[in-house]
Amino acid sequence: MQRLQVCLVSQQLGEVKSGVGVYTRNVARKLLADGHSVTLICPRERASTDIPGLRLELVSGKGTGTSHVRWLMLSRRFGRALRALRRQQKFHLVHFTDAREVLFCPLRGIPAVGNMNDYYFAVAPRSPWVFKRDYVDWPIRWAYYNTVRLLERRALGKLTAIICNSHHTKDVLAEQYRLSSERLPVIYKSIDLSQYTFRPRRLEDGHPSVLFIGGNVQRKGLPTLIRAAPLVLQAFPGARFVVVGDNQNMKAMKALCLQNGVQENFHFLGWRSHDQIQEHYQRSTVFVMPSLIEAFGVVFLEAMASGVPVIGGDVGGTKELIQDGVNGLLVAPRDHRALAEKILYLLQNEESRQRLIQNGLGTVQRFGVEGMLQETYALYRRLLA
């Protein structure tokens, strides 16, 4: 491949708040290692300078907050930075690690790719009453989701190719936004196995630890886990439920714990670094994320790589990763009784638990960083050809 001049655009570099930063780091390092030139447009507050050869074009992240609307404000700043950069140098292509952030960016005359990391705006219900069932902030969420749906459709129309993180995401975007299949390549997210320690924990002391990790806690199914907890505690009174992540609705989640009488068993830790999350995987007996809607779920890969059996929602791209009863368990969204049964099954059947753990390790080995990057290179070549 010719020596490329690539412009990466990302909300973060490195492990900050989500896997987007880790993905950005992996792509930048690979491009630079192969002799290409990389310029990264990134908020100053979420950038690091520990990658030799990486050129940084920093914008201010002040005033954008940490809410979901952050991407909209950053898109304008990214657009101004990209416009200025293109006056100074020529790029072969631009790569957005969040496809929506292309909305206000000038792209005439240059191929552009963007990663589509979710699809929940595309399937946002038109009726606000549907949101009321699952979200305490349902009026605001309904308005926001349906507004972003319109903006997202416009943004995706500007991209030459949209990298989907699962076939389910691809199918949803093709149907909802009437996008051609050729513009929707599927490249699964991956993890660097060398960053994880496979150390399965045996349940010996009768005090299991159930781990949940997620930011958008309502959509990730935390209320279902809270409602399932009393049934688990009947059999394992000493069980701990550890919640890693932060969200504007955490106060409501704690109130739900109080309502279900499990407030003493739930431990809300907020955001944690990659190393700290590793420690929690090592202490966990089961990992649970019973999402209402899910595009893929890199955290399942992380748990598998750490030797923790997983339970996910029987939805979306999760089903492309977890085979029920083979390398993990699946549960219907909102079914807290079924979730409790699945958790108890793993806690009471050590042989089955170990089998799922070993099969999980085999699964995660198929989702390596090198394979993901080679597929990304193949997409670059196709676009430039």
Image (tube, grey):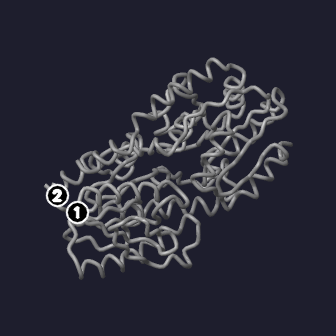
Q: Residue at x 54, y 78 (%)?
A: 62
Instruction: Classify mark 2: residues with Cα within 10 Å, few (<14), some (14-19) or many (20+).
Output: few
Q: Position of residue 307 (x, y in %)?
A: 57, 33
Q: Nearer the viewer, residue 302 or 172?
A: 302
Q: Nearer the viewer, residue 150 or 262?
A: 262
Q: Secondary structure at mark 1?
A: loop
Please state if 385 lies on the left or on the right of 6 as rendered. Answer: left
Please state if 383 lies on the left or on the right of 320 as rendered. Answer: left
In the displayed structure, 99 sits above or below 225; it is below
Residue holding disc 2: 384
Residue type, numbered disc 1: Pro
Q: Position of residue 306 (x, y in %)?
A: 56, 37
Write down the quadrant of residue 140 in the picture: bottom right
Instruction: Classify mark 1: residues with Cα within 10 Å, few (<14), some (14-19) or many (20+).
Output: some
Q: Residue at x 39, y 54 (%)?
A: 26
Q: Position of residue 309 (x, y in %)?
A: 60, 31
Let me know if residue 194 appears in the view.
yes
Please state if 341 lies on the left or on the right of 353 as rendered. Answer: right
Residue type, numbered disc 2: Leu
Disc 1 + disc 2, Cβ < 8 Å: yes
